[in-house]
Amino acid sequence: MSDPAPSPSAAGPGRFGRASAVRALGDGRFAAEIAAGWDIAGNADGGYLLAIAARAVTSVTGTPDPVTVTAHFLAPGRPGPATVTVDLVRRGRRHATAGFRLTSGPPDDPVVHLVGVCTTTDLAGATGPVRVDVVPPDLPPVDDCVAVEPGDPFPPPFMAQVDVRLHPDDLPFRAGGRSGSPRVRGWFRLRDDEPVDGLGLVLAVDAFPPTSFNTDLPVAWTPTVELTAHVRARPAPGWLACAFVTRNIAGGYLETDGEVWDGRGVLVAQSRQLQLLPPTA
Amino acid sequence: MSDPAPSPSAAGPGRFGRASAVRALGDGRFAAEIAAGWDIAGNADGGYLLAIAARAVTSVTGTPDPVTVTAHFLAPGRPGPATVTVDLVRRGRRHATAGFRLTSGPPDDPVVHLVGVCTTTDLAGATGPVRVDVVPPDLPPVDDCVAVEPGDPFPPPFMAQVDVRLHPDDLPFRAGGRSGSPRVRGWFRLRDDEPVDGLGLVLAVDAFPPTSFNTDLPVAWTPTVELTAHVRARPAPGWLACAFVTRNIAGGYLETDGEVWDGRGVLVAQSRQLQLLPPTA
């Protein structure tokens, strides 16, 4: 073919595509660069790291949509060179499944940041009966929500890389208060008019402030132990309505469930993460 | 030490412990046996297979509780010898994380049934603030629920291995009807008075009939693509109250969220699986 289709891992035109680009090294290995400025207090955003890894996976599997991807977060990521190793386990007619690791440092003694499994597919032709028993979050119009722009030291630098507008009701933590309800809702889009694809959804599900900021608990940070995202549909262009809620805080852990809806009212992604609730001395 | 503590992977006294036992072969490899009678229409129950794999992981990590475990299901399991391969990625102070595969067949060309990642810990001393915004399912007393015993061809043989009592409201599918709501609730315990530990919870979250049986959709079976379980606490002895609900059926997939509660009202496990909704011609 003289005009091949672009690789599913082709980087998009904006800063997300550039910052999450990967370059094949052969043998399932990919070079990546953890970009500066994608961090929360020095540590790269988890969804951003997972998007880098998932992009490498889609390059190996040949299908662009991570219909289900899980990563366990073992060490914080810092700006600099990184390597994604993809181990294709099975390629079927509809799905392909691979294990992956995101590492940095010397090849003979790397730091493993993420280890996970991803199954990809092509959702372009996905059809089937529809029954959705949840509804999009009740968000004020984008202009009535509150833009999250990076500050010093908070909001973190990462917020410059995405465009997040929070529901005013979920924002009392910014003034030193708390809504009392472990919930954060708001709008999401990529900057630079970059469309959100399946990999952008992996970023979206970890792009909001922690739900714990709105609880009455003395919680400062809640590092992710594990994050699973289900990418269920290609989003329509435009803003995405997102809702994150925590229902089970106990034993030093909490879970956060996420939903991402597009402008057509399609539930395009669901996520769940397990986070640590570090003891506050 | 003359009297070492039992391995965290020690099989329990009942049929679950026996059927999910693993034997170390060295180098992270374990021999297992997919037992006959643990199947649904010939294919071994997914939670059962995952419990075998997670048992091998706990044996390597040295801590008994799979606080988060994910598997992608690539091929059905049939009775016979199987191998679990565990690849320890990191052992920290609190958590240890490993990749795993469950395979069968010739070592040089195995069938991969499951590939996944598991992080284990010891939940015995888990403490922290508690805030739980969900409640246990409203179940009638055990004796007013409906025992699921294997039949011919349904309920499947697997139901002889666990003791499941369903909420009568969620049972119309047994009479050829449907409640209309993709929900299944009921009680769970292991047979043979075997206590439910963290591995038993991995079994429990996949031990109930599919939620889709209660929808108005023409659904016969919904194979699991991926299952993630969070084991959040050691259950108190006795019956466990379980609830499974599906909220997003679309594009040929559905998700099922599970909750398992013990008799103290502790949410001991949360689960989510992504399932296929095969087209019905």
Image: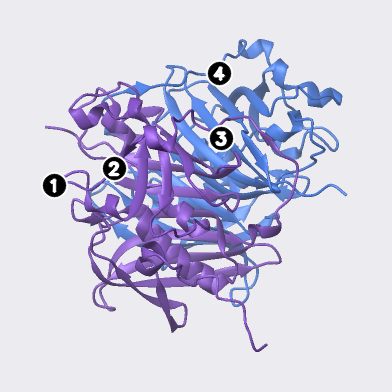
Chain colours: A purple, B blue
Q: Position of residue A30 (x, y in %)?
A: 40, 76
**Disc 4 chain ID:** B
Residue at 78 percent of width and 45 percent of height: B41
User: Which residue position holds label 4?
Assistant: B137
Q: Amino acid at mark 3?
A: Asp
Q: Can marks 4 and 2 be said to lie on one chain?
A: no
**Disc 1 chain ID:** A
Q: Are marks 1 and 4 in contact (CB under 8 Å)?
A: no
Residue at 33 percent of width and 33 percent of height: A211
Q: Position of residue A27 (x, y in %)?
A: 47, 82
Question: In the figure, residue A164 lies in which quadrant?
Answer: top left
Distance, label 4 to label 2, CA atoms, is 38 Å
Question: Which is more toward the observer, B208 or A178?
Answer: A178
Give the answer, above or below, for where B110 lies relative to B127. Answer: below
Residue at 52 percent of width and 29 percent of height: B259
Q: Earlier in the sequence, mark 4 or mark 3?
A: 4
Q: Can marks 4 and 3 be said to lie on one chain?
A: yes
User: Which residue position holds label 1?
Assistant: A152
Q: Position of residue A243 (x, y in %)?
A: 44, 35
**Disc 3 chain ID:** B
Q: Amino acid at mark 1?
A: Asp
User: Which residue position holds label 3?
Assistant: B257
